[in-house]
Amino acid sequence: MIKKKQLMEWEAYPSELDLTLADQKVLSLAKKHLEYSYSPYSRFKVGTGLLLDNGAFIGGSNQENASYPLCLCAERVALAAAASVHPNIPVRTLAVTIQHADKMIGEPAMPCGACRQVICEVEQKQQQGIRIITQGMKGEVYIFESGLSILPLAFDASFLL
Ligand code: THU
């Protein structure tokens, strides 16, 4: 038997003011889109912002349903919108942020497992990683170089094709 391990690496910044102006812009778009979240059941708003290779910005937010499993995550809403409006233009950066109605969350908001899988699918389709910028309701900002870097040993099309 041999032990295998994978190192995870990302960048941590004390606040959004420490980001480049371009990254600050994508993160502010995510914050703006918190406003459009429809989340009466969880009272947990998620906002996303995308920057595409052609310079386009696309926002997204979580959209819930009384039939809970139908809730749409903000990351997938934004990625589907980008693919619909700008087909075949690679997504360069995805920013995510959150707003909880009842408590302060200071840690960066991580995409759920299902969203990580979808981000990896888009990366494979566009043959290019998507930088992921995350922040909680305040404070520290994390930047990950790709979706694959937060979904180690991902399942992908190579198993099927
Ligand atoms: N949610 C997202 O929008 N993105 C994630 O990555 C995690 C969860 C949403 C789904 C639901 O509307 C609410 O957050 C609580 O799970």
Image (cartoon, rainbow, N blue to C red):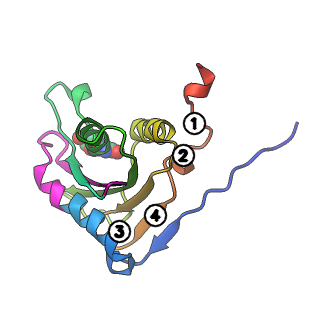
Label number found at residue 41: none
Residue behind mark 3: 23
Q: Residues within 10 Å of mark 4 (few under 14, many from 20)?
A: many
Residue behind mark 2: 148
Which numbered disc flags the more N-terminal residue, 4 or 3?
Answer: 3
| C-beta proximity under 8 Å, tags 2 and 1 | yes
Q: Is residue 122 above or below residue 15?
A: above
Q: Quadrant of the N terminus?
A: top right
Q: How much space separates mark 1 and mark 4, taking CA atoms?
A: 19 Å
- Please state which of the two labelled residues, at mark 3 or mark 1, is closer to the viewer: 3
70 part of magenta stretch: no
Which numbered disc flags the more N-terminal residue, 3 or 1?
Answer: 3
| Towards the viewer: 116 or 122 | 122
Pinpoint residue 43: horizontal percent, then vertical percent. Answer: 16, 47
Q: Quadrant of the C terminus?
A: top right
Q: How much space separates mark 2 and mark 1, taking CA atoms?
A: 7 Å
> Along the horizontal axis of the image, is 146 left or right of 62?
right
Pinpoint residue 81: horizontal percent, then vertical percent. Answer: 24, 40
